Amino acid sequence: MSHWTEVRPSEDFYRVLDADGRPLDDPPDVDEETLRRMYRAFVRSRAFDAKALSLQRRGEISIHAASTGEEAVSVGSAAALEPDDWCFPTYRQTAASIYWDAPLARTFAGLMGAEPETVAEHLDDESNPAVNFSPPYIPLTVNVTNAVGSAMADAFNDRDTVTMSYVGDGSTSEGDFHEALNFAGVFEAPAVTICHNNQWAISVPTHRQTAAETFARKAEAHGVPYDRVDGNDVLAVYEKSREAIERARNGGGPTLLECVTYRMVDHNTADEDSVYRDEEELARWADLDPVDRFETYLREAGVMDDDEMDRVAEAAEADVDEAVEAARSVPRSDPQRMFDNHLHGESWTERHQRAELRREGMGENPFVDFDGEGFK
Amino acid sequence: MSSGDVALDVEGDTERWNVVDAVRETLAQEMRRDDAVRLLGYDVGPIGGVFRATEGLYEEFGGERVIDTPLSENGILGTAVGMAMRGERVVPEIQFMGFLYPAFGQLMYSLAKLHERSGGGIEVPMTVRIPYGGGIKSSEYHSESTETFLVHTPGVRVVCPSTPAQTKGLLAASIRHPDPVMFLEPKRIYRGEREAVPTGEYTLSLDEARVVREGEDVTLLTWGAMLEHAETAADSVDADVEIVDLVSLSPLDVETVLDSVKKTGRCVVLHEARRTLGLGAELSALVNEYALDHLHAPIKRATGYDVHFPGHQTEDAYLPDAERAEHAIRAVMSYEF
Ligand SMILES: Cc1ncc(C[n+]2csc(CCOP(=O)(O)OP(=O)(O)O)c2C)c(N)n1
């Protein structure tokens, strides 16, 4: 098996750090505060994924898709956003919202299956992150089109807000990807689309996804500028994202960034990756782990030492544990919640079906209304 | 139960408009009223849409309010949702209902879903205008009446006017409403009869069916372009027919339907969609579940057949008309449990 799952294996992408985490050129211009926040997001994201996995194994959550190994894509790109910008993620970018301090308890409660209304009611005093996050999208690529619409709204209103969205390599095969990029190009929307090329779409490798040389080049068909970046190099992702965001903010239109990375774990907790990929491939990518590379950089640049890193790790564990406790304190959702927030106002059907459910819950026969008056 | 033409209660000047005039004038009025209203679609710009429903609007409001887009239904709905999430009141046009299908992903995944998915946090105020229905002798996929797909979608309203005055009130109400509304325009009556439509602002309820004509013997449930057949049929049969125009196909005004059927004891549904799992099936089920004791005869459905919409030499045979409605009415009148 080849080391790369792509048609033409290539390391022809933008990179700031070498495989070990040493700058290839002059150290990049990123302030220390941002570097620290990025590191903190990495560590919190790993702690979050580890906890989610254990909760899943214990049956407290049904399914979770981790981002282990590819956090640099989410963290580097999201860190380049500014407060009031917008971000439309999938299930794979928890680290992006973690960077912006989205409350972890809410995320856990969602994974535990609580209805969003219940979560909001019981965990309501936590503040929203400075960057606006849409709810994570489960249907693939739909978010990208919505993100471009959000960016178009900003352009039409002469606001300098930027909208970022994420798509996996597999998802670039969906129509929405092309529809979104096409609109973004035509309307010069301030939309930055990040393609997480993590080499696999569940069990389907990238060469089965496209015959194009790179995913980035798909933007060419839409007249959208593109770039290809080492997705395990958080500084490279940050720099290219910042460039794209600045261009968008200044009226320069959209960008597609392909971030080449690797999913180090199962697709999600229901997957079994040993069936379709081998140890050798995993080992090669383990050597390029984004957190290790970043740690080396931070130590050698004198930004953080081991003590501080340990403190960050301890704090992350503590925060995650606290978030899980808070999520567990959320009561089970009242089944009536399933009727909430479909349409504004009341309909006969809704009133009737709510009453039927209530009766069923009380062990009564819900079918005894023969004139439509019974459950009004 | 609402009755009669609410629009006629509106004070002030009127002008004689047909349905397409009403659509255009209402869009203009709402765009003047609210800067957030933007139209989106292909051909909606300088030519004013293939049905001229947006004629003159590009000149008045410019290309950022009347946005000619790439030819991409899914792209239109998808970007419209993003704009709606950011506070715009978007009114996308799907050129023909038969071309809504490429947009089903965005319809189901985001348009219909985001409000509920966000626990009520995100509003997607949007009115998708969809010319629908047959009787215009057009080519394939230009005559579809597949509103059942939309009625089966949670989280969107489905509204269908049948007269010019009603079109104005319902379209204005839809645009101002916080829910996504699928606004079905019966294109066959776009350029049908003109009537006096109040030029001032007014809205009509999206939740209420309209009792077009009161009667004692049989209830005829219908909507859109079928209303005129319903009226002709009612005039031709030897029975006192109550005609109910559903107006809102989702959610349904079940009370008005049940009240009428309980009064008359007989029911016919007239719709041009295919029969199996068409809205008539649901109406029939509702009457069966909640008004069976009042029935003197089974419910009959005068509808299209379970086939692809046929070529234009055949479409008159496919489409229900006054005669098919009359047969159904006579049949249920001839039966007594
Ligand atoms: C429209 C749609 N089809 C199928 C799925 C099921 N599904 C979930 S994730 C996935 C693979 C996605 O791969 P990719 O786009 O490469 O993203 P990754 O998971 O690798 O980040 C599939 C097929 C879905 N969520 N949405």
Image (spheres, helix red, strand yellow):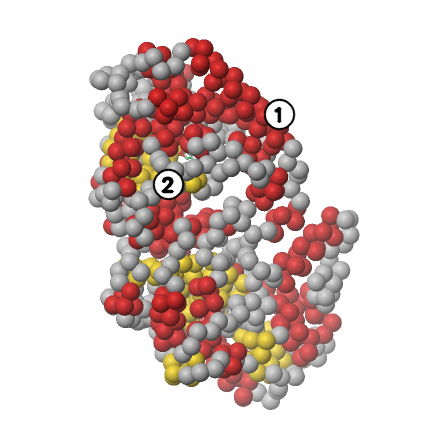
> Which residue lies at the image location 31% right of the left edge and 19% below the top edge?
A3
Q: Is residue A285 above or below residue B133?
A: above
> Which residue lies at the image location 34% right of the left edge and 12% below the top edge?
A302
The residue that mark 1 highlights is A58
Label 2 crowding class (10 Å Cα cut-off): few <14, some 14-19, many 20+?
Answer: some
Report which quarter residue B54 is drawn in.
bottom left
Q: Which of the two residues, B38 or A51, is positioned nearer the viewer here?
A: B38
Q: Where is residue A204 in the image (x, y as percent from the top left)?
A: 39, 31
Q: Is residue A72 among what the camera can see?
A: no
Q: Where is residue B79 in the image (x, y as percent from the top left)?
A: 36, 51
Q: Do labels 2 and 1 share a chain?
A: yes
B219 vs B129, left or right, is right
Dividing the image into four quarters, tell me where ligand 1 lies: top left
> Which residue lies at the image location 37% right of the left edge and 45% below the top edge?
A147
Q: Write down the chain letter for disc 2.
A: A
Q: In this view, does A156 lie above or below B53?
A: above
Q: Is residue A300 among what the camera can see?
A: yes
Q: Is mark 2 on a helix, strand or loop?
A: loop
- Res B120 label: none
Q: Is residue B321 above or below residue A325?
A: below
Quarter of the image where the C terminus of chain B is located: bottom right
Q: What residue type is labelled 2?
A: Asp
Q: Position of residue B52 (x, y in %)?
A: 30, 71
Report which quarter residue B142 is drawn in.
bottom left
Q: Which of the two residues, B278 or B330, is positioned nearer the viewer here?
A: B278
Q: Where is residue A356 in the image (x, y as percent from the top left)?
A: 70, 55
> Which residue lies at the image location 36% right of the left edge and 25% below the top edge?
A34
Q: Which of the two residues, B231 or B259, is positioned nearer the viewer here?
A: B259
Q: Write down the chain letter for disc 1.
A: A
Q: What residue type is labelled 1?
A: Arg
The residue that mark 2 highlights is A85
